[in-house]
Image (cartoon, helix red, strand yellow):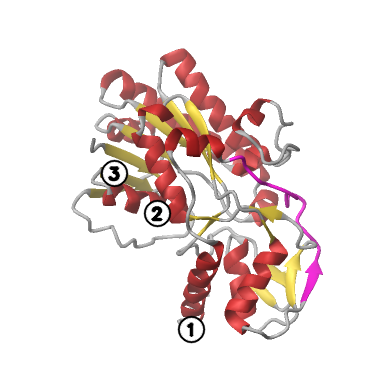
Amino acid sequence: MHMKILVTGAAGFIAGYVVAELLKHGHHVVGIDNFSKYGPVAKAHDTHPNYRFVFGDCKDTRLMTELAGDCDRIIAGAAMIGGISYFHQYAYDLLAENERITASTFDAAIAARRSGRLSRIVALSSSMVFESATTFPTPETEITRAPPPASSYGFQKLAVEYFARAAHQQYGLPFTIVRPFNCVGLGEGKALGDAEVMSGNVKLSMSHVLPDLAQKVLRGQDPLHILGEGDQVRCYTHGADLARGIRLCAELPEAENDDFNLSTAEPTTVLELAELVWREVHGDKPFRHTCDAPFEYDVRRRVPDTAKAERVLGFTATVPLAESVREVVGWVRAELAANRL
């Protein structure tokens, strides 16, 4: 069944993949964004006949209610979000600004459910809700068992999940909660508010570890500087895989009023990722690295249990990490050559 879907934060990193995926599968999409993260960005699907982009602020509840009232689904991806430096730079803003965005979005969804055609909200949470988890791989049921996240960002993402459940409890708004894990892919440029952080002799200009490592290796950094010991464990999931999982969460009746970890099941240390990037750029040249002081909220281990998404949604991540590395290294190389980094 083809639907009309409102995607908030449509100019963002993950949402860019989501909009393309929805259009590919015949849905009509309305995207809203105020370009607050990257500044104005162009996407390949901007001129697609089934896509309408609205430049606007998700905190404008009247606008959001108007847009949502004519849609079947909301995929709520809008948030103030950046790299790990954001967690330290914007501890209060990540809480307050994202609460305002979340409340406005859910107010609009409740109103649109009452008077329009909206029948479900798909709320994007984050792997950071499991920041303090000690059970690995971490199943969805740990959301009520693990201690609360230490960072204000992780705590606010947990609040998003409470918004979804509370709106359902009080107003009958159907929901699906999705938790993407460590998205990798193309188009993730420097966020406007990112702090300038030096890593060895290279100024970091990205928000996530893979493009940062690619930039440092391509600039010839040797030994390669790594934040922390490099033993931090993540599950790097391609944006195309995440978008497919999010689309299934929006489409499938089985996903209603439930929550899903969306991720590859393959854990990788930062050091292993760094060596993959090094080999992609330098081939057999001996890999050398040195360790810099880590960030405070650099979670040691984040590995999800992905069995539920596979069982209920039929979702499994398929893009190998080596392919993601090759793609991102090629993109960063082109950005460097064009002096855009």
Q: Outermost residue, top direction?
A: 170
Q: Three-letter amino acid code at disc 3?
A: Val
Mark 2 or mark 3, whichever is nearer to me: 2
Q: Where 243 sits versus 100, above or below?
A: below
Is 71 displayed left or right of 266 in the figure? left
* Residue 96 drawn in magenta: no
Nearer to us in this view, 70 or 229 = 229
Nearer to us in this view, 326 or 291 = 326
Callout 3 crowding tier (Cα within 10 Å): few <14, some 14–19, many ≥20: many
Q: Quadrant of residue 290?
A: bottom right
In primary-sequence order, the first of circles 2 and 1 is 2
User: How much space separates mark 3 and mark 1, taking CA atoms?
Assistant: 34 Å
Q: Where 150 sits versus 228, above or below?
A: above
User: How much space separates mark 2 and mark 1, taking CA atoms?
Assistant: 25 Å
In primary-sequence order, the first of circles 2 and 3 is 2
Mark 2 or mark 1, whichever is nearer to me: 2
Label 1: element kind:
helix
The image quadrant where one finds the N terminus is top left
Nearer to us in this view, 233 or 293 = 233
Q: Which residues are magenta?
A: 289-305
Please name the residue that numbered disc 2 is placed on: 17
Is 253 displayed left or right of 292 in the figure? left
Q: Where 5 sits versus 108, above or below?
A: below
Is 133 displayed left or right of 36 in the figure? right
User: How much space separates mark 2 and mark 3, taking CA atoms?
Assistant: 14 Å
Label pair 3/1, CB-CB below 8 angstroms: no
Q: Three-letter amino acid code at disc 1?
A: Ala
Please name the residue that numbered disc 3 is placed on: 30
Please name the residue that numbered disc 1 is placed on: 337
Label pair 2/1, CB-CB below 8 angstroms: no
Callout 1 crowding tier (Cα within 10 Å): few <14, some 14–19, many ≥20: few
Q: Outermost residue, left direction?
A: 49
